């Protein structure tokens, strides 16, 4: 091209030093090209940074307020909601980068030899394009507590009813004080001896909740060497007498009855008949107690309170990992693609198993890429904000608090600009060492 | 290559039909696992979309998956109500202005600076460049309070411009870094010959650097656009009426139903998804430039 022909020519007038006027004009050109960036960075980044640092030593309101020294920083480490924010952020840093990196690595390795890899990666990467705010709202729908509404609790209910079905009488109550609650079930207070009869009356059972096939309750007469009894719905239209088996009252079939010896150990269990009667045979002499097993009263799965105070942070972590796994996958997969194939093949030829190849060759070779993902995630997590404010309902935002949210709430809901500035500076100080690592790498590559 | 592979393959006894079926079977559990993971990853977004097309009376009593047994429930009434109720169109407009305005501003300013750092000669050039990269460490939380006050003093809080300038400043350090590193890879000969031909620096910048730098500029634009479109904290702090702020103000009514929240949220993520699919290549390139390179 023309460039070649020109550089090939000897520069005729290049030998004497450049005129200072021209140099100055070139410096000026450089300055003009930089001017817009300098203004933006100066006004929107440098000035505010200095201001916020200074402001963090002054009181609550006003342009500067009054000098308070390090009081704002003391507040930061002593106010419980702010301490919660710091603790939560520590959990975020401890959990998210590791999980995201691990998931990305696993996905990248698993999809390496799958034909529709692009489709899978696109799907997992998709959340990266969505705002963290929209993700928060999306997951808030997923996390609704009612298993009829929230997809995650619906899944939980499906699993839990497959594992253990809800009890036949989840809402029943004892009809008299003779029955007392005992470890989730009920226990007859009065001790029984062989030949005795146990009366286990229950109320609070809606007609639709009476087990199918229930017949008129029958009180057994009692038999020597055995303990018999009846469990029945101690209620009939019009009331009836509590503790007495009357005509019109139904036996409760399928109820688990337990017989405990004097030490409280369960020695026999049985299920009641359609008329509610049951019998423990071959009971040796002694004192026993009869009762109804806890499983009878097992409540149906009501859903975890994901958005409640204790589960909100795990709920947030899951949603956040959902966003960023795709990022890790794409970055790690590109590192994987650039890996020397011969090394892997050599290891396989030497008889290494796939897992050994993964642990001893793939992971060490990928270490630089993995650390990039990890560090990027640490920075992201330190500044996390949008997803928390979107996913956590206002009632649990104090439990879900993180540093960036605490800063925003302190400054713009509480209008305490002093403490708000101190929190911002604290965040700044946390980010600096991590980003310094990243910038060093940037410069190496630049 | 192909011929070699052919000659090797034919005599291998492994490659019988049975062996191939066996190998496919061995991979089946993995394939199934990946399909399940992929579906799980899609569930939240699909759920949001289905919720957005269900009437509020349905979503308050049953989960969105009810649509699979009652497909006739689907309706776009929520969307038309949303557009007719007002507020949304203005919010969409503001979001678009902020996102496009910021993208243009960052690209122009960063390209100018990137060119200066790459190809112009002035004292302290590399040190200033390092300082600009150093500004990457400043989290935007550091600027919220002072800019809130400054905007208040000058009365520009709440305008699209206030958000554009804020985003642009915080986008610049990375943008300058990215473009400078790309521009420095442009062959020196091209620039030198233009200079000897008497071209001005501005001419070189507009006619040579910008077209040659297009791949990097494309990645940068996509990132800036998505970043601004998806922002909440800036519009929340300076009360800029963007789509996300519109949704945020509706959040308190979340318990009362999903008829506004769900369609508005879905709308807010349609544009980023379209941008993502249209420019996926540049998106991933930019991502890798930022992290692995």
Image (spheres, coloured by chain):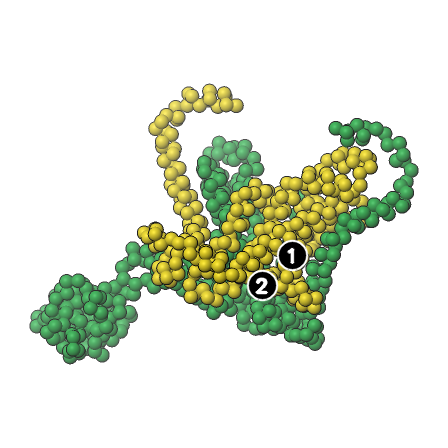
Chain colours: A green, B yellow
Circle 1 Cα neighbour tier, 10 Å, few/some/many (<14 / 14–19 / ≥20): many
Q: Chain of mark 1?
A: B
Q: Residue at x 73, y 47 (%)?
A: B112
Locate residue A391 relative to residue A184 in the image: left or right: right
Locate residue A433 relative to residue A179 in the image: left or right: right
Asked if residue A430 is positioned above or below residue B221 in the image, the reply reads: below
Asked if residue A229 is positioned above or below residue A24 in the image, the reply reads: below
Please state the total of marks drawn on the protein image.
Answer: 2
Q: Nearer the viewer, residue B35 or B246?
A: B246
Reading the image, the residue beneath label 1 is: B164
Which label is found at residue A161? Answer: none
Position of residue A438 measured from the top left corner of the image (x, y, whole percent): 64, 51
Locate residue A215 relative to residue A188 in the image: left or right: left
Asked if residue A400 is positioned above or below residue B107 in the image, the reply reads: below
How far apart marks 1 and 2 lie (CA) works out to 14 Å
Q: Residue at x 67, y 44 (%)?
A: A445
Q: Are marks 1 and 2 on the same chain?
A: yes
Q: Quadrant of residue A424?
A: bottom right
Asked if residue B217 is positioned above or below residue B84 in the image, the reply reads: above
Circle 2 Cα neighbour tier, 10 Å, few/some/many (<14 / 14–19 / ≥20): some
Marks 1 and 2 close (CB-CB < 8 Å): no
Position of residue A178 measured from the top left corner of the image (x, y, whole percent): 21, 78
Q: Quadrant of residue A159?
A: bottom left
Reading the image, the residue beneath label 2 is: B236
Q: Residue at x 79, y 27 (%)?
A: A5
């Amino acid at each position: 091209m023309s460039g070649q022909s020109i550089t090939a020519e000897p520069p005729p007038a290049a030998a004497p030093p450049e005129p200072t006027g021209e140099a100055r004009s070139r410096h000026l050109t450089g300055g003009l090209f930089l001017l817009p960036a300098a203004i933006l960075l100066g006004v929107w980044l440098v000035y505010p940074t200095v201001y916020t640092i200074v402001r963090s030593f002054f009181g609550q309101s006003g342009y500067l307020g009054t000098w308070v020294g390090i009081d704002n920083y003391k507040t930061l480490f002593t106010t419980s909601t702010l301490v919660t924010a710091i603790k939560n952020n520590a959990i975020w840093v401890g959990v998210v980068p590791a999980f995201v990196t691990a998931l990305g690595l696993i996905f990248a390795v698993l999809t390496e030899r799958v034909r529709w890899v692009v489709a899978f990666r696109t799907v997992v990467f998709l959340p990266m394009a969505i705002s963290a705010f929209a993700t928060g709202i999306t997951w808030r729908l997923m996390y609704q507590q009612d298993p009829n509404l929230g997809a995650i609790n619906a899944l939980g209910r499906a699993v839990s009813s497959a594992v253990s079905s809800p009890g036949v009488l989840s809402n029943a109550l004892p009809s008299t004080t003779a029955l007392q609650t005992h470890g989730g079930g009920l226990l007859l207070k009065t001790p029984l001896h062989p030949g005795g009869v146990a009366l286990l009356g229950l109320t609070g059972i809606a007609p639709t909740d009476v087990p199918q096939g229930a017949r008129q309750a029958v009180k057994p007469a009692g038999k020597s060497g055995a303990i018999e009894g009846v469990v029945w719905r101690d209620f009939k239209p019009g009331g009836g007498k509590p503790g007495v088996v009357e005509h019109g009252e139904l036996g409760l079939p399928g109820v688990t009855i337990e017989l405990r010896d004097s030490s409280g150990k369960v020695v026999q269990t049985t299920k009641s008949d359609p008329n509610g009667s049951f019998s423990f045979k071959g009971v040796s002499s002694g004192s026993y107690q009869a009762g109804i097993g806890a499983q009878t009263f097992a409540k149906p799965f009501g859903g975890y309170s994901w958005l409640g105070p204790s589960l909100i942070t795990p709920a947030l972590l899951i949603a956040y990992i959902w966003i960023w796994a795709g990022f890790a996958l794409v970055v790690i997969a590109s590192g994987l693609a650039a890996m020397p194939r011969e090394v892997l093949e050599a290891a396989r030829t030497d008889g290494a198993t796939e897992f050994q190849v993964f642990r001893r060759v793939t992971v060490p070779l990928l270490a630089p890429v993995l650390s990039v993902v990890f560090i990027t995630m640490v920075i992201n997590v330190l500044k996390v904000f949008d997803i928390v404010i979107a996913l956590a309902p206002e009632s649990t935002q104090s439990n879900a608090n993180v540093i960036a949210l605490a800063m925003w709430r302190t400054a713009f809901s509480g209008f305490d600009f002093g403490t708000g500035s101190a929190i911002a500076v604290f965040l700044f100080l946390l980010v600096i060492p991590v980003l310094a690592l990243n910038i060093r790498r940037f410069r190496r590559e630049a | 290559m192909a011929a070699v592979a052919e000659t090797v393959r034919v005599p291998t006894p492994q490659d019988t039909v049975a062996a191939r079926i066996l190998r496919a079977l061995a991979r089946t559990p993995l394939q199934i696992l990946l399909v399940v993971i992929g579906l799980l990853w899609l569930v939240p977004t699909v759920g949001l979309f289905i919720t957005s097309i269900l009437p509020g009376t349905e979503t308050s009593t049953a989960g969105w998956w009810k649509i699979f047994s009652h497909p006739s429930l689907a309706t776009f009434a929520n969307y038309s109500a949303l557009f007719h109720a007002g507020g949304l169109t203005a919010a969409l407009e503001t979001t678009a202005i902020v996102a496009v305005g910021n993208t243009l501003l960052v690209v122009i300013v960063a390209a100018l600076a990137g060119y200066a750092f790459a190809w112009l000669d002035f004292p302290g050039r590399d040190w200033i460049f390092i300082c600009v990269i150093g500004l990457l460490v400043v989290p935007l939380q550091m600027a919220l309070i002072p800019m809130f006050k400054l905007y208040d003093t000058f009365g520009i809080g709440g305008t699209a411009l206030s958000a554009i300038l804020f985003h642009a400043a915080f986008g610049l350090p990375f943008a300058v870094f990215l473009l400078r590193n790309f521009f420095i890879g442009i062959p020196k000969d091209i620039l030198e010959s233009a200079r000897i031909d008497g071209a001005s620096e501005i001419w070189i910048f507009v006619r040579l650097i910008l077209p040659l730098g297009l791949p990097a500029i494309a990645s940068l634009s996509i990132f800036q656009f998505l970043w601004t479109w998806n922002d909440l904290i800036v519009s929340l702090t300076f009360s800029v009426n963007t789509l996300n702020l519109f949704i945020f103000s509706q959040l308190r009514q979340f318990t009362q139903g999903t008829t506004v929240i769900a369609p508005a949220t879905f709308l807010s993520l349609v544009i980023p998804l379209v941008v993502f699919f249209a420019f996926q290549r540049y998106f991933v390139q930019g991502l890798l430039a930022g992290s692995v390179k």
